[in-house]
Amino acid sequence: VSLLIASFRLRTTAQLALLALAALIVLHGFAGPQLAPRNLATVLTWVHYRGLLIGALLLAGNVFCGACPMILVRDIARRFHQPRRRWPSWLGRKAPGLVLFAIVLYSYELFDFWSWPAATASLVIGYFAAALVVDVTFRGAAFCRHICPVGQFSFIASTLSPTEVRPRDAGTCERCTTADCITGRRSPDDPSTILRRGCELGLFLPAKVGNLDCTFCLDCVRACPHDNVAIAWRAPGEELADDRRRSGLGRLSRRPDLAALALLFTFAALLNAFAMVGPAYDLQRQIALHMGVQSEAAVLALLFAAGLGAGPVLACGGAAWLTRRLTASDASLTQVAIRFAYALTPLGAGMWLAHYAFHFLTALGTVVPVAQIAVTDLTGRALLGEAVWGWMGVRPGAVFPFQIAVVLLGAFGAGMLTRGIAEREYSARAGRGAAAWLALIAILTAIAIWILAQPMEMRGATLGE
Amino acid sequence: MAHAGMPPMRVRAVERAPGVYDAALDLTMAGDWVLLVDVTLAGGRRVAHRIDLARVRSAP
């Protein structure tokens, strides 16, 4: 089954399908009506793609990275121009991706991408251009590994996926002398020729732990001459409490950038959902009023600085400080915070799912009339018939119990991971080690449920009356 | 609704007096709404007009 899934044709077919959708999004984004609910660019990107992305990550694996059409375009470009440079270490391994992740969320609120088809189309073009420029300049999968904001989102969310790519048999890897899974399978006649490329993200299969940095491209499955790499079922999230040294990444407890990614993922889930409810607009007006600021950009910047900067630092700093006091630990505040930050990831995933599932489920059927409109707009003929605004999706109120359930499930997962990390770090004092973090999880869960219970206010973030 | 994915509500306006038409709309949530008025004139000519209803607030 793994070989079937890993077949080159299947991946290329999926990439071509997504490339065609991206082209359609760009065409209709520019040429179609600039009314978001009637444009394929906004509907497909902000409703269906986001819902399917988080759903696929939590139910299957990082399949959208595996089928990424930008890699297809990049591979074609690399036939004409091979990159020669290494990714400069001074840029950091995850720092650019983290910053861009925050910038994309900020821009989404500032420019109201959800209601602006042409801007959405421009974003898609910009994304393809950036991937192309980076990957014809730097070797390997530099864009995926260091820059792609969706990739960073997918990497951290995929730690909760029920599947992972790993060796079938450890003994086979021990006896392997070629390490094709990372170096690529080479031609026996001409060893300088690579027939099947190895992992471009530097994940050596025998030392690979979990899904972080794995794009599910399955290059390793195709490269392994022993057919020893497979997609396997596993316990979702367990890897977040696993501090073994992992190929390409090292130990999680020594990666502040990855811990920052887990925190950004979790707090951004809350902020992104909060930005859609009435109290968010009231808060923005209050900020503007009290600070005498009229610029929406400045008010949003303050909100994001608090929500994604000061909030996580104070929350985790406080929990780490309490943990040190309760356990009489010698570890520094930062070390304690890094070790436990990963445990919050399931709560973040629950909130992302609750938020995106709302849009996806309540607007599932809108893709039908909007696709009919798009075909008519782009061809001049109603080839799919006139738009039929029939069943649009699940009633909004019906989604609420599901939203609460997935947030609570995420909180439960976060609690289990916290307990696991505390047992690993403090053994006999595990209860004391986990206490502050369990309290933090309870507070964040209460905030998440409060946000979901607020009346939604779907509009561009404008200030004043 | 200006947000992608929100289904449109379609209502037919009823003539109450010469040149005066009534239509009831249930704006189901706060936010930005867009009113698209599609008129068919006596001669069969169609006229479309867009009215933006920004910052609709929830009833207290």
Image: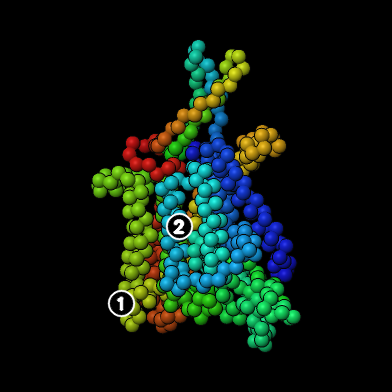
Is A382 located above or below residue A261 in the figure? above
Name the image quarter holding the N terminus of chain A.
bottom right
Which chain contains the residue that carries disc 1? Answer: A
Q: Residue at x 65, y 36 (%)?
A: A376
Q: Residue at x 66, y 83 (%)?
A: A178
In the structure shown, which secondary structural element does the residue marked by tag 2 occupy?
helix
Would you say residue A351 is visible in this rendering? Answer: yes
The dot on residue A269 is: 2
Q: Residue at x 67, y 55 (%)?
A: A16
The dot on residue A325 is: 1
Residue A240 locus on image (x, y percent): 50, 72
Q: Is disc 2 surrounded by few (<14), some (14 to 19) or many (20+) residues within 10 Å?
A: many
- Report the side of A414 relative to A18 (left or right): left
Q: Is disc 1 surrounded by few (<14), some (14 to 19) or many (20+) residues within 10 Å?
A: few
Residue A432 or A171: which is nearer the viewer?
A: A171
**Quadrant in the picture for residue A232:** bottom right
**Marks 1 and 2, how far apart at CA:** 30 Å
In the structure shown, which secondary structural element does the residue marked by tag 1 occupy?
helix
